[in-house]
Image (cartoon, rainbow, N blue to C red):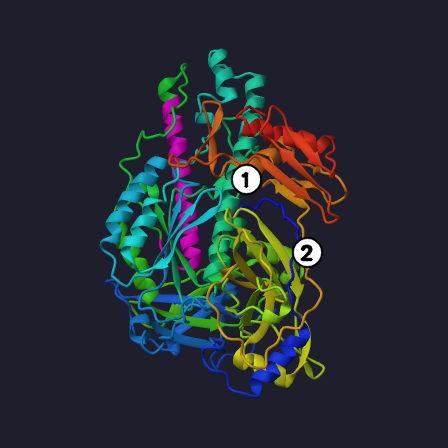
Amino acid sequence: MSHVATTFLRRAALFAGVALFVAAAIGLRAQTPSPASAPAAPQSPASAPAVKVQTKLITVDVVANDSHGDPVRGLKKEDFQIFEEHNREQRIVQFEFIDRAANAVASAAAAPAAGTTFTNEISSNRTIPPTILLMDALNTDITNQSEVHRHMLMLLKTLPANTSIAVFSLGHELHVIQSFSTDPKLVRAAVDHALNPLPQDQNPQDDPDSPSNVALDQNGGTETTQTLYLEDLENQLYEQQTAIRVDETTDAMLEIAKYLAGYPGRKNLIWFSEAFPNWLAPQADSGTDLFIGAASYEDKIRKATESLNDAQVAIYPVDAQGLAPDQLYATSQTPHINHQNPGGGFATQLRRQNNAHLDQQATMDEVAENTGGRTCKNTNDLSGCVQAAINDGAVYYELSYYPEGVPWDGRFHKIEVKTKQHGVKLSYRRGYFATDVQATAGGKNPQQLLQDACRGPLPSTAIPLTVEPIAPDQTSGKPGDGRYLLTISSAPLSIPAAGGARQLSLQMAVCEYDVKGDKFQFLSRDLSSSVPEPVYLGWREHGIRNVFDYDARPEDTHLRFAVLDVPTGITGSVDVPAHPSQFASLPAGLTAPAVAPAQRSVTTALTFKSSSGKSARLDWSAGKVTYQGELGIELGASGFFQKYVGGNYHCQAGALVANDPKSTAVPKLGFLLQSTNGQSVLVDLTGAEPAYSGSLPVDEYGKSFFIQVWKLCHCQAP
């Protein structure tokens, strides 16, 4: 789904109320609901310690193998030791041996009735860990993608029949090709659709058409002040393009972490990619300043892997170049030849390519090591790589502890796990960020977090939700209205005691999508309340339940219910049909009192950032559309274009063409910006110049911004 910040307002009714929470919980405690009408919320183990907000529970999945690579069973809690920095040993408060094959029958859960219940909860009756195959077209040349595709098809023939596989594709956005399935035909069809020929950024030093190399050739290979300054600009732009790729890749990993957070146990993410460099080194042989264009992406990598760690997701990167034929002297673009020294110039380019490949592999090694996975590189044994990931997730030890004597300073803290058993090799995550969860969540706008939960292509599972469409209220006079019973698990929520009561800080939103799915309408509501202890106990037993009447538009295809636990910042969301045809029964004791319509939330700014810290905003919150900030208009416009157009189209022969050769879709070059006071402007970039219509004015800086976007949309140099 696109991040285009355009929200269309219309008349809709969202009925909810805090009083309903109290009435629902008391009513449920007065009688025992049937399983069909009251799905029980998952409960934490009785031995689990109370939730601590500042000092979060650190869970470490430990894979123990012998010298032959086979899993080691039978280890006890006392066989392990966990150390933090400075050799401080930590106390293990939870310990569990996970053997999925042995525990599958015991953990099997009844599936909800198809057609009437929609949930983001996943049962744990799996003998093989859920595995996502992520084809990374954003960072992988199409030739290497084709090799990966060929090997993936071979791989699918060797996997066990009950392997649950999902197939995702990463372009400028994350796309779900196939959700989890054990049907090999569906998975194979998804793999066939995972190819995406995106243009790859080339180091300007190796690009024969870069302005600096063109000027250099015109000067007979002699560097001049002009070529040096051109190299400075190109190095800076190349770094910014790389930073965008890093942001888009790590954002996708964050989305996957949110999606998998509610899945029990360890999960696998197989990342087929050439990856991105973990840093861009200073260029001593280019430009006037060797540090122009230099950058490090360590923090972004670590923060993404921290979210995956919290969700118990292990990354297994597969080097796409390792699956292709010999890479020596192979390049997808025509190299630049220094005619004054062709041999030396070609050798220099090969050295740069080799160093870049090593840096990309260093990124793979880092994300694998940080999450307890393994890197598959310099090999064509894809089946062996994936089978190793499946084996690791099927048999492992789960150790948890509350860090003691650790400053919560936001830094990355290293973890070391040891075993007293000889000859045992351990694989596990290498650390975590010592972040004050409450302070971090408090610094984020709840409305923005809920909008993010609606923008993502994947639902969030950290808070389990169940939604049941129920028959519309025939007495309301509006028989077309939809009615939904929402059940929210209280287990992951922060509901502290306050003055003899319990304080719930919970917000929710309903987002509706049309058939195109690239825009959504966002309606939010605050569900916070203070309730007595008996109501809280009812929540723990049955979940927090409420009934919502919602009038969706005729053209809507589905809705997404999203909830946010404000103290911790975690979210849960689930997709449901906007116009259901099958209905469950409304349990006794639940009613839907009408209250005022929900507040509408409209996004009124877009922020653009570079890795150097510069930023700018396209802002229409103050009665006009303007562009302001340190980041140049050309760079902001480039980011806007890549996000909203470049993900699906590229320039060819002076015109935009679809990245998918089979697609006949025409690029959408109209953008509607709407302010909270109802003013709006439609920016139309389809004509000979940008055109503006509506009541919201666009100032000179805003018009300059859209002129640059128009040039990119019409394949003209900005």
Q: Is residue 666 left or right of residue 550?
A: left
What kind of residue is marked 1? Tyr
Q: Position of residue 453 (x, y in %)?
A: 56, 57
Foreground mark, 2 or 1, reads 2
101 lies above or below 249: below
Residue stretch rendered in magenta on the structure? 345-374
Q: Amino acid at mark 2?
A: Arg
Q: Secondary structure at mark 1?
A: helix
Up-down relation of residue 16 to residue 234 (above or below): below
**Residue 485 picture location, percent across and down:** 55, 71
> Badge 2 is on which residue?
600
**In the shown orientation, is residue 280 left or right of residue 449?**
left
Most foreground residue, 718 or 620: 620
Name the residue tied to disc 1: 644
In the picture as drawn, the residue positioned furthest to the right comes out as 623
Residue 160 picture quarter: bottom left
Classify mark 2: helix, strand or loop. Answer: strand
Q: Check if mark 2's residue and mark 1's residue have beta carbons within 8 Å.
A: no
Q: Earlier in the sequence, mark 2 or mark 1?
A: 2
Residue at point 55%, 30% (across, down): 713
Q: 194 and 206: which one is in front?
A: 194
Provide the major secondary structure of the magenta segment: helix
Q: Quadrant of the C terminus?
A: top right
| Residue 548 falls inside the magenta stretch | no
Q: Give the label on residue 342, or none.
A: none
Answer few, some or many: residues within 10 Å of disc 1's Cα (few below 14, many 20 plus, some between 14 and 19).
Answer: many
Q: CA distance from mark 2 to mark 1?
A: 24 Å
Q: Is residue 425 something that shows in the picture? A: no
Of residues 258 and 407, which is closer to you in this image?
258
Percent position of residue 161, x then y? 25, 61
Magenta run includes residue 352: yes
